[in-house]
Image (cartoon, coloured by chain):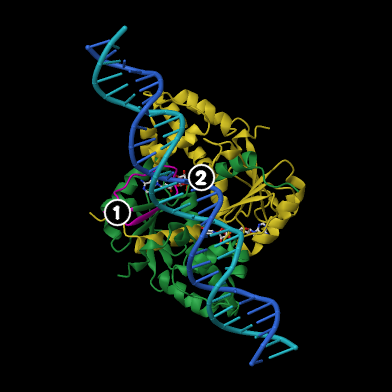
Chain colours: A yellow, B green, C blue, D cyan
Amino acid sequence: MEMEQNKIPQATAKRLPLYYRFINNLHTQGKSRVSSKELSEAVKVDSATIRRDFSYFGALGKKGYGYNVEYLLSFFRQTLDQDETTEVALIGVGNLGTAFLHYNFTKNNNTKIQIAFDTQSEKIGSVIGNVPIEHIDQLEAKMSNISVAILTVPSSAAQGIADRLVAAGISGILNFTPARITVPEHVRVHHIDLAVELQALVYFLKHYPLEEE
Amino acid sequence: MEMEQNKIPQATAKRLPLYYRFINNLHTQGKSRVSSKELSEAVKVDSATIRRDFSYFGALGKKGYGYNVEYLLSFFRQTLDQDETTEVALIGVGNLGTAFLHYNFTKNNNTKIQIAFDTQSEKIGSVIGNVPIEHIDQLEAKMSNISVAILTVPSSAAQGIADRLVAAGISGILNFTPARITVPEHVRVHHIDLAVELQALVYFLKHYPLEEE
DNA sequence: CAATAGTCGTTACGTTTTTCACAATCTCGC
DNA sequence: GCGAGATTGTGAAAAACGTAACGACTATTG
Ligand SMILES: NC(=O)c1ccc[n+]([C@@H]2O[C@H](COP(=O)([O-])OP(=O)(O)OC[C@H]3O[C@@H](n4cnc5c(N)ncnc54)[C@H](O)[C@@H]3O)[C@@H](O)[C@H]2O)c1
Ligand SMILES: NC(=O)c1ccc[n+]([C@@H]2O[C@H](COP(=O)([O-])OP(=O)(O)OC[C@H]3O[C@@H](n4cnc5c(N)ncnc54)[C@H](O)[C@@H]3O)[C@@H](O)[C@H]2O)c1
């Protein structure tokens, strides 16, 4: 398909959903026009960076005016494939997994947790946040046409489950376990390591003093 | 205090907790020696990057040998201030907040959620994961000597709570709400935007095809 | 003890990302 | 319809980051 946008910097790609959400908010509020400066204040990204990011997609704005919210929204909706929903599976219905099931990612978003898996028999068969929970043995059988998984199992189980996901044909894994899993090259893994994030924040506070005034 | 390490790149600083955790694991397993190559495979960071990262702290290893696990561990323990516990407050005991309260960050970590706040009266006074839940009105009164907060309130409440945290003298906020909060320069905010992370992963899958083989 | 294999620390280089700064262009009120 | 003011898009420079490569040194083996 359209591969011409292959040169969009990764740093830019990561910001796109953020832009999209805010533009969506503006549209809901009935605003019809926005400048890179306003956007910058709202999403806390330098305005030059925003203009540069947008420019990878061509000239989306008008000089002296800014950006038309409706146009921007429809453009990003298309670019981020907001019209087709991506189905997601969640593995490990524990503390974190349950929280995600209760959260409606579909608001402002094209992703939907379609099915969840766990080992604990008392959870199997129940439904949390409209998502049915199946036994992990059903993983391979029920994962057809699901290409993204959220991994919230204990870290000791992470690699084993990852291997099974790969065998079942997964494309992407959002890994919340501290385990750095090994997968083939054609599978993309994003790690979100909450303990590391917290510890890094503490480190920054102690060693990178900010302007006291 | 020791400000000489002020020039450690941010990218390096963010990896330190990751290194620390793995070195800790090695030590627990009784390993006494490790090379940058082994570390690299475990934490999925290029071995040259690891050597470079370590080198900002001086010569921690021995050529031809690698790194002594015990030495490395004690060094990082000190560097990451693992001996003093950082007390953390959590605001918003909902789905996500509850999950965090159940999680013991103190394992492998120098941080401890000491107190939580919410508005819902049925939660006040209860204890989740050893953490007492107080009414949000108590925020200012009970936040003395707490310098870090985890923010898991609805996004509509985020800025208001952030302002109160700032007034109460907070230094750092780990913000899980989609709201990009505004704070004075001397307060550090790290955003973890789970919906954005998920959406970004989906975007990468569709637009950055990896090597199929 | 010499030869070999292993590994670090660092230099040099390439890439990615951010930021500055401003000409080009547009808007809008008068 | 004009001119002052606003804002974009982008070239160029700077900053940040990652990695290949290799000299220097160490451990280990025979
Ligand atoms: N809860 C947090 O705040 C938090 C913070 C940082 C990291 N994490 C990480 O997130 C992961 C999940 O944390 P949690 O607190 O939700 O843990 P949890 O123990 O509450 O949940 C894990 C769930 O996975 C299920 N499970 C175990 N083995 C399984 C398997 N083989 N297949 C399918 N399901 C299986 C368990 O039955 C349980 O329901 C852990 O790796 C943890 O280290 C959690
Ligand atoms: N749960 C998820 O998976 C998820 C995913 C992405 C983002 N988020 C974000 O994380 C945040 C929390 O999500 P959640 O699912 O836990 O929401 P939630 O509604 O379950 O929890 C919010 C909690 O905050 C409390 N609260 C409300 N106003 C408050 C105030 N002024 N002071 C103190 N407490 C207050 C509520 O009583 C509730 O207990 C939200 O901003 C949400 O957008 C959550």
Q: Nearer the viewer, residue A20 or B37?
A: B37
Q: Nearer the viewer, residue A145 or A208?
A: A208
B67 lies above or below B147: below
SS assignment at label 1: loop
Q: Residues within 10 Å of mark 1 (few under 14, many from 20)?
A: some
Image x and y of residue B50, in percent:
54, 65
Q: Which mark is residue A11?
A: 2
Is residue B82 among what the camera can see? Answer: no
Image x and y of residue B51, in percent:
53, 67
Image x and y of residue B160, in percent:
32, 44
Tell me which residue sits at (46%, 36%) in the image.
A52
On screen, residue A31 versus residue B209, left or right, reads left
Quadrant housing the C terminus of chain A = bottom left
B188 lies above or below A4: below
On screen, residue A10 versus residue B169, left or right, reads right
Q: Nearer the viewer, residue A12 or B52?
A: B52
Q: Which residues are magenta?
A: B168-187
Q: Which mark is residue B35?
A: none
Tell me which residue sits at (44%, 70%) in the image.
B57
The amino acid sitting under disc 1 is His
Give the residue pinned by disc 1: B186
